[in-house]
């Protein structure tokens, strides 16, 4: 459930995120099946009437006038039933999610009476009868009732573990091969999600530079044609661009934006969290994860399906949003979501057919090292340790650098005492075997949902006359850390957003702190320029008030925050792009955006830095000074990739614009669109 409502401060609260309360679908209002047992009366007519008025005023704009869904999920009918069909989940669980998480990150702006009234109206629209007793959070019938009394249709068969490809389908004859990927840092293509195995997001191209940047103009655009969360990071090889939506994989001509092929994955399970950030390519294969737990391989030239293997279970919180990486004959990937109590892991699978090779548990099992760091005095379900951003890899040593995110339940540290390894840690694994080589935990026993989001980029630099091999980590705590890859020590720490009251743990009384639950560095991380010797870091500046619950309620497949986070009014949120001396950690320049910065940042040998803003602006900076060289409004908020590449000797930039997700859109979401830029003949006025 989501609301559009003005908080006590008068700020408009926007529609929520589908993942918290269901899955988007077009459905009908429900009447109970004729053969179904009688449903208990749990609310009064007057309560439902009051709830209908509140719903139409505050909820219908997102969920639809008939509860059939819109920009937020349906609250009645088959789609609603499917989302809550797990037999372990009761109406009490549904109401708990509604009253503790909605409106998103601002649940305290509604009274408990208002929450109950709206839920009474939802019950009425799903065929539950009224009675003489008002609904409250303590209503006992909620704990034994379910959204669906009886199945309406035969149960969907269990998803297959392996799906063979199209008859006769084989990988394309084209590359890139391993040798080409090893040299990606020098390539004029964009071969990996973060450009190269080191994750530098740096291109050696120079046609777009401090002189020519003002002459950029759109060269072509591609409208995806889906209402989707659009966070894709384009991959470009030999004139072909590969992008994704939640379910579609699309190949475009990288110079003209014309479609070469489009493959749409038919999900085998219903999943509420709809994201995908991109693909990996190698040896004629395009490989990606799907939100319903599959690893999928396609022919790079035709899009023909080669194979799909089920490697995760959405019912256990395992979905795949990150762009995998391909190394030798392995696909390296791991599942999100910590907020659904996933038992996190990183795994390797054969590129030929998805056969599992190794798995490292980021939430240790009994008997594994690190298990002793989870104290859990009350024996509640615990987990987390998801991964949702691309990895960095040293191909000479096979060191795989992975950023592991938060523990679950997110906020109540009094319930999960201890360091909670390997959450909020950079772990370094042997890419070929999965053996742990070393780790560094950045936020022990996290109480703020401060995921470590990136363990990139890797680079070498000179410090006090000595050459040092460094890797950078960033996360939602708003701190960039440079770590020595040989000594494993932290060389420096630099704040990239506002940090206030950050050392105070979250307790059961409200505690305000910065960053908030959506603060710091999100799914796009830093870029490193060897030309300037600087790091360029996007960040969100958005504080919140945190409250942990004394007790928590685990609901399979749903959010497991263990507390409440009330964000500051949206007009208080802003963003930063920070340039940092990569050898010392000193801040060289900062750019303030009117909105949080979540888009990718790309640096080039032309001494420019390219990024996008939620204002819709594609913006280019002088990499040395931070001066704005170019600005173009793409028509939708930018939260996806920014990739630069050459076709036919000409440099282009592709920007993923529009609809990054409901959390990051207040007014117009825009339409998912790839906008490609190139240098034109005259400067744009």
Image (cartoon, helix red, strand yellow):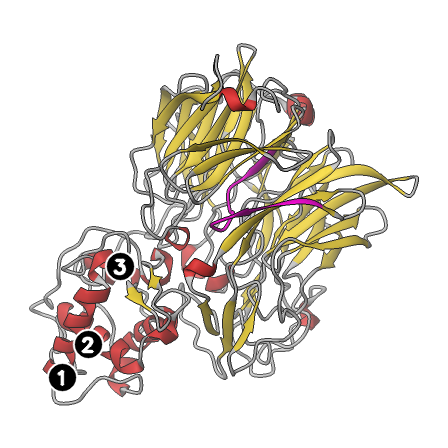
Look at mark 1 in the image and give the residue it sits on. 44
Q: Disc 3 to disc 1, how far (Cα)?
A: 26 Å
**Would you say 551 lies left or right of 371 here?**
left
| Residue 117 shows in the view | yes
Is residue 590 found inside the magenta-colored segment of the image? yes
Is residue 102 found inside the magenta-colored segment of the image? no
Q: Is mark 3 on a helix, strand or loop?
A: helix
Q: In this view, does 29 lie above or below 649?
A: below
Look at mark 3 in the image and give the residue it sits on. 82
Viewer-nearest of discs 2 and 3: 2
The residue at the far left in this view is 34
Q: Give the residue at x 84% y 46%.
A: 486
Evaluate if marks 1 and 2 touch, with contact meaning CB atoms under 8 Å apart.
Answer: yes
For marks 1 and 2, the one nearer the N-term is 1
Quarter of the image for the C terminus: give it: top left
The 10 Å Cα crowd at callout 3, few under 14, some 14 to 19, many 20 or more, is some
Evaluate if marks 3 and 1 touch, with contact meaning CB atoms under 8 Å apart.
Answer: no
Q: What stretch is highlighted in magenta?
A: 588-602
Q: Give the residue at x 18% y 74%.
A: 51
The residue at the far right in this view is 465
Q: Is mark 2 on a helix, strand or loop?
A: helix
Residue 120's disc number: 2
Can you give x and y, in whole percent of width and height, for residue 454 in the image?
Answer: 62, 48
**Would you say 634 lies left or right of 126 here?**
right
Front residue (pair 60, 258): 60
Front residue (pair 666, 343): 666
The residue at the far front in this view is 685
For marks 3 and 1, the one nearer the N-term is 1
Q: Disc 2 to disc 3, how far (Cα)?
A: 20 Å
């Amino acid at each position: 459930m989501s609301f559009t409502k003005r908080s006590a401060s008068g700020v408009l609260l926007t529609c929520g995120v589908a993942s918290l309360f269901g899955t988007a679908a077009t459905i009908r209002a429900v009447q109970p099946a004729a053969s179904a047992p009688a449903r208990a009366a749990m609310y009064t007519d007057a309560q439902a009437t009051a709830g209908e008025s509140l719903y139409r005023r505050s909820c219908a704009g997102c969920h639809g006038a008939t509860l059939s869904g819109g920009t937020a999920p349906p609250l009645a009918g088959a789609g609603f039933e499917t989302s809550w069909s797990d037999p372990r989940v009761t109406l009490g669980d549904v109401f708990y999610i509604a009253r503790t998480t909605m409106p998103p990150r601002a649940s305290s702006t509604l009274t408990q009476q208002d929450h109950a009234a709206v839920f009474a109206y939802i019950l009425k629209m799903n065929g539950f009868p009224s009675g003489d007793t008002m609904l409250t959070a303590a209503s006992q019938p909620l704990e034994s009732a379910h959204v669906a009394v009886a199945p309406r249709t035969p149960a969907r068969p269990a998803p297959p573990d392996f799906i063979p490809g199209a008859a006769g389908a084989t990988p394309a004859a084209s590359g890139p091969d391993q040798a080409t990927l090893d040299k990606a840092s020098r390539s004029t293509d964009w071969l990996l999600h973060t450009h190269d195995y080191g994750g530098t997001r740096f291109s050696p191209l120079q046609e777009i530079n401090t002189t020519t940047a003002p002459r950029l103009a759109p060269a072509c655009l591609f409208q995806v044609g889906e209402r989707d969360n659009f966070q894709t990071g384009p991959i470009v090889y030999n004139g072909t661009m590969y992008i994704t939506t939640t379910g579609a994989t699309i190949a475009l001509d990288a110079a003209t934006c014309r479609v070469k092929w489009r493959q749409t994955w038919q999900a085998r399970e219903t999943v509420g969290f709809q994201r995908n950030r991109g693909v990996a390519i190698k040896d004629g294969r395009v490989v990606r994860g799907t939100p319903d737990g599959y690893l999928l391989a396609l022919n790079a030239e035709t899009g023909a399906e080669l194979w799909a293997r089920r490697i995760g279970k959405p019912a256990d919180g395992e979905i795949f949003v990150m762009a995998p990486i391909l190394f030798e004959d392995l696909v390296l990937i791991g599942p999100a979501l910590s907020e659904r109590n996933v038992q996190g892991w990183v795994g390797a699978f054969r590129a030929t057919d998805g056969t599992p090779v190794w798995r490292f548990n980021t939430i240790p099992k009994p008997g594994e090292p690190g298990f002793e760091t989870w104290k859990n005095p009350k024996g509640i379900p615990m987990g987390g340790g998801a991964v949702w951003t691309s990895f960095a890899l040293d191909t000479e040593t096979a060191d795989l650098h992975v950023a592991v995110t938060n523990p679950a339940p997110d906020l109540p540290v009094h319930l999960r005492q201890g360091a909670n390894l390997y959450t909020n840690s950079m772990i370094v694994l042997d890419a070929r075997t999965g053996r742990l080589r070393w780790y560094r935990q950045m936020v022990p026993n996290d109480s703020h949902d401060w995921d470590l989001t990136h363990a990139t980029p890797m680079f070498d630099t000179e410090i006090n006359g000595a050459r040092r091999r460094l890797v950078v980590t960033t996360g939602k705590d708003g701190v960039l850390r440079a770590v020595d890859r040989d000594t494993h020590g932290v060389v420096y720490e630099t704040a990239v957003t506002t940090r206030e009251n950050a050392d105070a743990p979250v307790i059961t009384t409200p505690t305000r702190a910065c960053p908030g639950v959506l603060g710091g560095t999100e799914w796009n991380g830093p870029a490193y320029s060897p030309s300037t010797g600087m790091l360029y870091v996007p960040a969100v500046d958005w504080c919140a008030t945190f409250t942990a619950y004394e007790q928590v309620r685990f609901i399979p497949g749903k959010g497991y925050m263990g507390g409440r986070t009330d964000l500051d009014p949206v007009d208080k949120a802003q963003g930063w792009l920070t340039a940092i001396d990569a050898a010392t950690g000193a801040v060289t320049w900062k750019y303030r955006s009117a909105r949080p910065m979540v888009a990718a940042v790309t640096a080039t040998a032309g001494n420019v830095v390219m990024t996008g803003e939620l204002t819709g602006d594609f913006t280019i900076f002088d990499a040395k000074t931070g001066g704005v060289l170019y600005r173009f409004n793409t028509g939708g908020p930018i939260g996806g990739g920014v990739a630069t590449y050459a076709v036919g000797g000409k440099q282009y930039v592709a920007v993923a614009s529009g609809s990054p997700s409901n959390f990051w859109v207040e007014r117009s979401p825009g339409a998912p669109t790839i906008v490609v830029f190139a240098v034109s003949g005259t400067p744009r006025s």
